[in-house]
Structure formats: structure tokens, C-alpha cells
Amino acid sequence: MNKYRAPYDPEIHDMHQKAWSEEDLMYLCSMYENTKGADLALALGRTHATILSKVYHLRKTRKFDEYKRKGKAM
């Protein structure tokens, strides 16, 4: 286990195994480059690994920039 990542805790990670909302995706993409992954994980109620995985998937499917633009426009 990585000593810098918080282990899964159902009280902190309350969105575990729940679908991502459009608003969460916009927040994630617009804040990702200027915010630590661990801070985003706490803000979104997800694990750090989930944040990294979702960003990877969004970039791979070329949706990251779309959500980033939508998030900046909010």
C-alpha cells in the first residue's frame, strides 16, 4: 500500500461504486491540473486511485478537455 494515499474508508469515500455525475466530471477535469489528487479524492468522496483511473479513461476517450471547458464555464 502506498503510504501517501489514504486507504478506502466508507465514511470518507461515500461515493464508492456510484456513477459519476456530469457535475462531478466537470469539477474533476477543471480542477485536476491545479489541485492535488488526494484533495480531489476527498472533495469527490472517491479514492485517489479512482480519480487517477477516471482521468486516464477520460483522456483516452478524448472527453477530458470537453468536461474541462464545461467546468471552467460554470
Image (tube, helix red, strand yellow):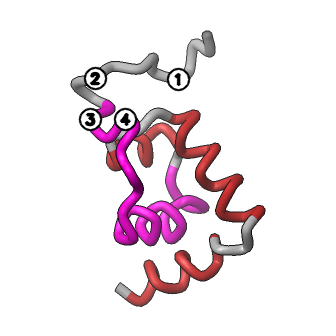
* Measured Cα–Cα span from mark 4 to mark 3: 6 Å
Residue 7 as seen in the image, left or right of residue 43: right
* Measured Cα–Cα span from mark 1 to mark 4: 16 Å
| Three-letter code for the amino acid on which mark 4 is drawn | His
* Measured Cα–Cα span from mark 2 to mark 3: 6 Å
Badge 4: how crowded within 10 Å, few (<14), some, or many (20+)? some
Of residues 52 and 31, the one nearer the viewer is 52
* Measured Cα–Cα span from mark 1 to mark 3: 16 Å
Q: Which residue is mark 3?
A: 14
| Three-letter code for the amino acid on which mark 1 is drawn | Arg
Q: Are marks 4 and 3 in contact (CB under 8 Å)?
A: yes
Residue 3 as seen in the image, left or right of residue 47: right
Quarter occupied by the N terminus: top right
Q: Which residue is mark 4?
A: 16
The residue located at (35%, 45%) in the rendering is 18
Q: Which residue is mark 1?
A: 5
Q: Give above or below for 6 relative to 15.
A: above
Numbered tag placed on residue 40 in the rendering: none
Q: Nearer the viewer, mark 1 or mark 4?
A: 4
* Measured Cα–Cα span from mark 2 to mark 1: 15 Å
Q: Nearer the viewer, mark 2 or mark 1?
A: 2
| Three-letter code for the amino acid on which mark 3 is drawn | Asp
Of label 1 and label 3, which has the lower sequence position?
Answer: 1
Residue 2 as seen in the image, left or right of residue 73: right
Q: Are marks 1 and 4 in contact (CB under 8 Å)?
A: no
Query: Which element carries disc 4, helix, strand or loop?
Result: loop
Of label 2 and label 1, which has the lower sequence position?
Answer: 1
